[in-house]
Amino acid sequence: MIAPILIVVLAIAAYYIGTSLTNNDPLPTTNIAADEVSVVAQKPERKAEVYGKVIKMEGNLVTISQIDLAADPTAEMTTEEKQAYKQSLSEEERMALKEVTQNATLGEVTVMIPVGIPMTKKTAQGPDAPEVEGTLADVSVGSLLSVWIDTTVSDKKVAEFVKISSVVN
């Protein structure tokens, strides 16, 4: 009894698969570059209110150790100036600069990152690395984040946009 039903179901499935393969309609495509641009274009014009390293995650609540950008001598430099400055340093000096800037903290802050808000992540290290769409799943302990806070929420810190710069070990 089950065998005839299974044969009929398989025949119908084969028919639909066959007609969809021979149909001349183009396959649906997505323009990944346009999607990436649209998310990057949603980044607010103002500077991020929170910048730092993720030290704890519970669901979509992220605790960030805020980095004091005033301790970074390259904070106000353009990308080109920053590259030239860092290239002029020895490896030891670069590591010392990284250590100083990452350890100069303003304390901890907990931010709620709502699922589905616009997020970007860098595809490689470096200041000129392209950004693509990111998700909450891309955030982990050790990630370096720039967070723009939703100014319409006054009783807690809720992200409106997040940029994932890197994972710091």
Image (cartoon, helix red, strand yellow):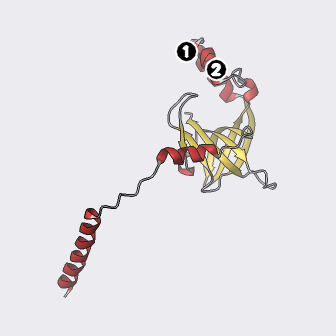
101 w.r.t. 149: above or below: above
Query: 143 left or right of 14?
Result: right
Residue neighbourhood size for the residue with mark 2, other residues' Cα within 10 Å, grouped as few (<14), some (14–19), many (≥20): some
Could one spot residue 143 in this view of the protein?
A: no
Tag of residue 148: none
Mark 1 is surrounded, within 10 Å at the Cα level, by few (under 14), some (14 to 19) or many (20 or more) other residues, namely few
Q: What residue do we see at 25% from left, 78% from top?
A: 9
Q: Secondary structure at mark 1?
A: helix
Mark 1: amino acid: Glu
Q: Is residue 11 above or below residue 60?
A: below
152 displayed left or right of 147? right
**Residue at left 71%, top 25%?**
75
Q: Which mark is residue 91?
A: 1
- Labels 2, 1: front one: 2
Q: Nearer the viewer, residue 57 or 7?
A: 7
Residue 68 image position (x, y, % from top left): 74, 30
The spot of residue 67 in percent (x, y) is: 70, 33
